[in-house]
Image: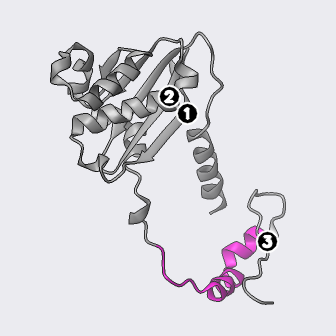
Amino acid sequence: AVTAFEKSKKELANSTTLYHPVMDAQLAMVVDASDTAMGAALHQQIEKEWQPLGFYSKKLAPSQKKYSAYDRELLAAHMAVKYFRHMVEGRPFTIYTDHKPLIYAFKQKEDKCSPRQLRHLDFIGQFTTDIQHVKGIDNVVADALSRVNIATIETPSHINFQEMANNQKGDQELTKILAQTGNSSLILQPFVIGDP
């Protein structure tokens, strides 16, 4: 149990570690939108390895949920550029999306665009016009950020903390772990809930 805990803790820390920006590194912004949210990740390439610089995620407003897939993906790119503006301004970078029609956004005629699409494209175009396609299966981070839906996580309406404390006191494996001082970073402290 301790080994699994330590491994999980290390993997979680390593998977979310952000790197310091290197000014001459190649940048890539990966964006995605779902029916409920949008997400993006900004990466830099150092020695053929992509390193995350930051993440962005935002729930769509009720009116934005009614947008077409193209408009949601364009909105995700627009909002990501806006969010990471301080990091991409004056630097060449590529936007990657799993929505193939978006790669032709800067090649279409203006009369085919709605005023909102023109505003979004105008803003994005101030920073980059390089939009590339990435397969959906390879768009893991942005896809995960765009699909976060906290409302679907259910928590029990009532947790019996006293029963939980009694179970911890009677757990033989936990007792052994606590007896081995210094061998684990797991620290349990007594916590009083309610009136003492």
Q: Is residue 105 magenta?
A: no
Mark 2–mark 3 contact, CB under 8 Å?
no
On the image, numbered disc 2 is attached to which residue? 42
76 vs 140, nearest the viewer: 76
Label 2 CA crowd tier, 10 Å (few <14, some 14–19, many 20+): many
Camera-near label (2 vs 3) is 2
Image: 17 above or below 192 = above
165 vs 77, nearest the viewer: 77
Q: For numbered disc 1, what is the local secondary structure?
A: strand
On the image, numbered disc 1 is attached to which residue? 54
Q: On the image, which quarter does residue 190 sit in?
A: bottom right
On the image, numbered disc 3 is attached to which residue? 189
Residue type pointed to by label 2: Leu
Image: 171 above or below 16 = below
The residue that appears at 50% across and 28% down in the rendered structure is 42
Quarter of the figure with the C terminus: bottom right
Residue 30 as seen in the image, left or right of residue 132: right
The residue that appears at 51% across and 25% down in the rendered structure is 43
Q: For numbered disc 3, what is the local secondary structure?
A: loop
The majority secondary structure of the magenta stretch comes to helix
Q: CA distance from mark 1 to mark 3?
A: 34 Å
Where residue 147 sits in the image (x, y, percent)? 37, 49
Q: For numbered disc 2, what is the local secondary structure?
A: strand
Span colored in magenta: 155-178
Residue type pointed to by label 1: Gly
Where residue 22 sits in the image (x, y, percent)? 63, 16
Label 3 CA crowd tier, 10 Å (few <14, some 14–19, many 20+): few
Camera-near label (1 vs 3) is 1
**Nearer the N terminus, badge 2 or badge 1?**
2
